[in-house]
Image (tube, rainbow, N blue to C red):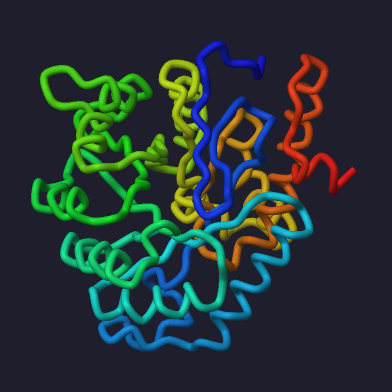
Amino acid sequence: MFFLEKDQKVYEIRGVKVGGQPGVNPTVLIGSVFYEGHKVVIDGKTGEFDRKKTETLMNDAEGLSDKYGNPFMLDVIGPSGIAFEEYISFVSEMTDAPFLIDGVTEEARIAAVNYVSEVGLHERVIFNSINQNTNPSEIDVLKRSKVKSAIIFTYNLRNPTIEGRLSLIKGGTEKSLLYVSEESGIEKILIDTCVLDPPDLGPATRAILLVKSEFGYPAGCGSGNAIDLWGKLKELDKTTCKMCIGSGLAFPASLGADFLLFGPIEHAKYVFPVCAMFNSYVAYAIKQYGLKPAKSHPLYRIF
């Protein structure tokens, strides 16, 4: 069920391994900070935020990572170049974890790419993302920058099916996103199979397995989108709601997801324990076929 015939690429980004046969390396969990509506943000235009509260949230998430064994990254969301500089400077000082550049606009992303290249943080950065709507100007900036890691986002407006997502990777009449990424100078490619609505986490998870089976690249998705868009979840009692958040966020880990963007960093307390459990089940299964989970795997921490 879990062993894939295709050779699997494994990338190391600032000490964090992403990719490989399901069960060998644990799922990397990525929490978002400074997102729209995040209570720590005081002024999104200038990048002013509550540093103490943000540091607490980051420390809590890293503590969960140490406890359960799933590596941790940050998804840094910025509305402008000015805000990005403030956010990135703080994050780079408070943690050694890799982080994503997730700009609200093209201008913000370009400013962030230039900034991390100038200050020497490029090796810790993953650009989020290269997609159908990425403009040539952004590709050109990436090509001239020192950033070498990026996420391919397989959102296909014309064909939002599983096959539609895969077609963006395969290419055809248009350049494939793999080609565009390599053209941008990207050497470490992660593929996000795109979650469009709450039940779409099922197709997105299926697409993860197909991406790994056919192309061998590390694959994952923004499982947090499925929870954020699930309006009726708020109608449930608190205990049921927390159970659904945890299992929903971590569900793709049960089928080999290499990374998950689980949404607000506040959700870390729900996703880490469940993801560690799912990862351990997969790891124990592959051990019986001669594969060895990484020494830091959750399997050796929670059982």
List the single residue furthest toward the top. 5
Q: Residue at x 55, y 62 (%)?
A: 97
Residue drawn at (47%, 34%) of the image: 219
Left or right: where 16 falls relative to 187: right
* Quadrant in which residue 297 is drawn: top right
Image position, residue 259 (x, y; %):
53, 43
Tell me what residue is drawn at x 63 percent, y 27 percent.
22
Q: Is residue 240 above or below residue 9?
A: below
Front residue of 109/11: it is 11
Q: Is residue 238 toward the left or the right of residue 134 in the image? A: right
Is 273 above or below relative to 167?
Answer: below
Q: Which is nearer the eye, 193 or 202?
A: 193
What is the x, y in percent for residue 220?
Answer: 49, 38
Residue 238 coordinates in the image, percent (x, y): 70, 62
Which of the two residues, 120 or 256, is positioned nearer the viewer here?
Answer: 120
Q: Residue at x 69, y 58 (%)?
A: 65
In the rendered image, the quadrant that contains the C terminus is top right
